[in-house]
Image (cartoon, rainbow, N blue to C red):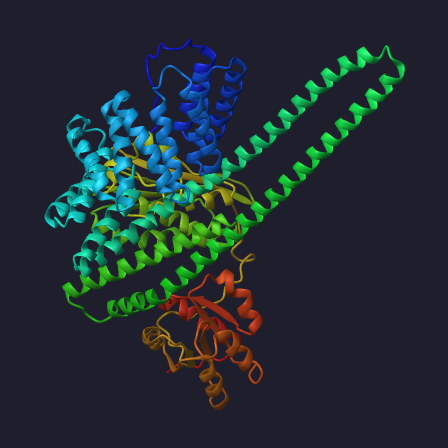
Amino acid sequence: MLAFPQNDSSFERIDSLDVLIKTAQQLRIENNMYDALELSFKAVTYAHELKHDHYLSHAYFIMGTIQYEIIDYENAKANMLKALKHSEKTSSKKLLPYILQGLANIYYDDNEDYENALIYYKKGVELSKKINPANNYQIALHNLIWTYMDLNRYKEAAPYLKEADSIAHMIPDSIQLGKSTLYLLRARNYANLGNIQNAEENFEKTLDILENEEKYWLKGKSYFYQYRSQMYQDIGQYTLALEDLKKMQKNELKVFQNARAKNEEIAKIRFKVDEYERKLEVSEREKILLQSIAKNNKVIIYISLIGLLLLLGAVFFYYRGYTSKKKASRVLEFKNIELNEAKLQAEKLSKVKSQFISTISHELRTPLYGVIGISSLLLEKEKPSKSEQELLDSLKFSADYLLNLVNKVLKISKIDSEKTDIITTPTSLQSLVKNILQTFEYQSSQKKNKLKLEYNNNIPHLLGIDALRLSEILINLIGNSIKFTENGTIWLRVQLRSLDSKKARVRFEIEDTGIGIPDDQKEYIFEEFSQIGSVYDNKQGTGLGLSIVKTLIQKMDSKIQFESHKDVGSKFYFDLNLKIYNQLNDTNHLNTPELGNALNSKLLLAEDNKINQLVTKKLLHKIGCTCSIVENGAEAVEILKKEKFDLVLMDINMPVLDGMQATLEIRKFDSKTPIIALTASELSEVGKECRNAGMNDLINKPLNKSDLREVIYRNLSTTKAIKTGN
């Protein structure tokens, strides 16, 4: 925390500099780093003109603090050292402890230079004890103790820890961060002394505080689990040590998610700061050049009385100007090269991030197929007992929730990389919204909520809709309402706003009687990973739903709006302009068979995962198909050379020979048998490669009975391979 001495009368105050410095400090607190840095630059320039050490130390201190927070450690260190130099020249030393602490923090975080950090922390502690209030002195003291312990110098840390204990009662209860740090330091010291009972007591007190202040110091939990795990490891309690390591890894994921959003903002700020500094350098060079020209003009006027010398002087100064500009041009060219390299690096990191998310999502979807498939099959058993039904419903809901989380993470990655396209098809809007609302009946009943649909029957039957994207939007909004509503009502309203011969303007409203959104949090609810705080902390969710909704609606040329009052409820709404289709002329629907009719077809399933083999075979049996199973692409090629099948279900990722390579081999001797790809990857990522290999269609894992039946029927009807059932 940055602080300044108050009521310091040891220097002459300058109002304009006071305003610049205080405004820069306020902008820094508000995270407006670029404007804060610009004002601090101005303050430094003005203070240099006045040769005022007090204001120079303040301005450089703010500059260094901002650059430290945007992880520009090199410039931060340089400016902190300047602040130190000017502060030591002033009669008042009230700012000096904060500068020393700032320098120590930079050395600590920059390549973990603990020894140099220790030097400045000790100087800061000595001065803070004389000058600062107890709470600020405590911060400096804790930093020093922490660094000694990181260096395993517990004996040297001991007297300072005793001092911290002696002033602990002077720290206000509102400063929870200081209290949690002190308990953690005590726990580390007791663990080092082998006093495990006292160490565990202080670890527990640390955790109690961290649970309440997580949003202020999320990284503190990682330190807590790290040090407690080390203690358990040292005393041979390896099971407890492993549990803490797992919790630390889980917490580090949260830290990573927060850092991801922060790093993106830091990157933007760093770019703007670099651009500003570049402009400032150019401006300084131009200023120097203008001063040089003014000076040279005086010389030229003076020597103009001497004819030949006038000409020589003009040539000389022309040459100097030319070389100076040429040098500036080379510097700018070099900066442009560095900027292009940084851009390429950022693009490379973005691709790595997308690939990482895609791979993790694929690996999670594959086992989820087994969980969801088996639970769905068990739910279809005749007359399960009430307890079995409840357990199966819970299992199915948990698996669907985890799959939805995986899909949301992948979806936000695709939206960020601008890979989301809106594709409209003729769709019955009324049927779509009824089906969506029906899927929430169980989830809503668990919280004793009522779901109500209000649909304007004047809306045309068939409209041009991207059913998948609209479903994502409505599912996220309705799911959000159910999550924050108990014993209440959720309405889905579909209203006709305007109508002409070609288009209908339709409004979608989702309203609930839930707990509402506090005024101070309305600004942030559409940000990625944002969660409503305070009394809402016990709600589950990723914080991605509303961000996805906002982006998808923007891609549909509309805007999400909402009204909300705490303890009253919330209403989200948006309008879409939808093309009207004539039911007889504009559609050409494939007549799929009723779910009760069997397909009676013989299929080959190529799948290496045993659980997925079992689930898929059961699903195929329920839709009237028999299947033979092989565990890799090589076996699929061999069996197709010997036997005839109506259709092949081919997993893409298999050992020995993967699905792509197997299909290429099959197409060398069989060009007619339909081959459908089974994949846990996004269809948009592998679709083109699958079709180039010779596959006829694709379907996403986890499979469900209706989708599997539809894709099989579609491909069998094309080849006229469906057999008539009895």
| Rendered residue at 35%/19% (across/down) | 93
Q: Quadrant of the N terminus?
A: top left
Asked if 324 appears above or below 112 in the picture, the reply is above
Q: Looking at the image, which is closer to me, 275 or 596?
A: 275
Q: Is residue 159 visible?
A: yes
| Rendered residue at 43%/80% (across/down) | 632
Asked if 619 appears above or below 26 in the picture, the reply is below
Residue 347 position in % (x across, y down): 54, 50
Left or right side of 485 for 259: right
- Report the label total: 0
Residue 221 position in % (x across, y down): 26, 45
Residue 399 position in % (x across, y down): 29, 60
Q: Looking at the image, which is closer to me, 420 or 442?
A: 420
Q: Quadrant of residue 91?
A: top left
Q: Looking at the image, which is closer to me, 658 or 438?
A: 658
Residue 610 position in % (x across, y down): 33, 76
Q: Residue furthest right?
A: 307
Q: Quadrant of the C terminus?
A: bottom left
Asked if 265 appears above or below 581 in the picture, the reply is above
Q: Is residue 428 visible?
A: no
Q: Residue furthest bottom?
A: 642
Q: Looking at the image, which is closer to me, 481 or 406?
A: 406
